[in-house]
């Protein structure tokens, strides 16, 4: 293949891929906005859920004590 035609095909495909990436990016941000969740909000909610779980585990107290056997 001639180098000029190869360059033209590469340029065309590059523009096409950038357009698809931009459309995908716009679709992702639009779906997030519709859902009402941002990345920061999800991280914050997950962090508080982990804190709540940790507090519940510590409030449950120690588990059953294992009896030690003397040989």
Image: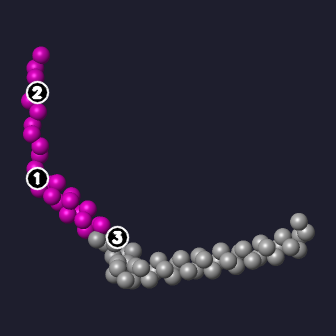
Give the mark nearer the N terminus: 3 vs 1: 3
Q: Residues within 10 Å of mark 3 (few under 14, many from 20)?
A: few
Residue that numbered label 2 is attached to = 68
In the picture shown, does residue 56 fall above or below 6? Answer: above
The residue that appears at 83% across and 73% down in the rendered structure is 7
Q: Which residue is drawn at 49% across and 80% down?
A: 27
Residue in the image at 12% along x and 16% along y? 71
Judge depth for marks 1 and 2 and give the one in front: 1
Q: Name the residue under label 1.
A: 60
> Which residue is labeled 3 in the image?
43
The residue lying toward the viewer, choosing from 39 and 11, is 11
Q: Give the range drawn in magenta.
A: 46-71
Quarter location, residue 51: bottom left
N-term mark: 2 or 3: 3
Residue 14 drawn at (x, y percent) = 71, 75
Where residue 59 sits in the image (x, y, percent)?
Answer: 11, 56
Calculate the distance from the C-alpha at mark 1 to the C-alpha at mark 2.
23 Å
Tell me the element at label 2.
loop
Image quarter for residue 40?
A: bottom left
């Amino acid at each position: 293949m001639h180098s000029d035609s190869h360059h033209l095909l590469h340029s065309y495909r590059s523009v096409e891929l950038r357009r698809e990436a931009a459309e995908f990016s716009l679709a992702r941000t639009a779906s997030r906005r519709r859902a009402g969740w941002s990345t920061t909000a999800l991280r914050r909610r997950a962090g508080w859920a982990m804190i709540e779980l940790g507090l519940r585990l510590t409030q449950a107290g120690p588990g059953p004590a294992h009896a030690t056997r003397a040989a």
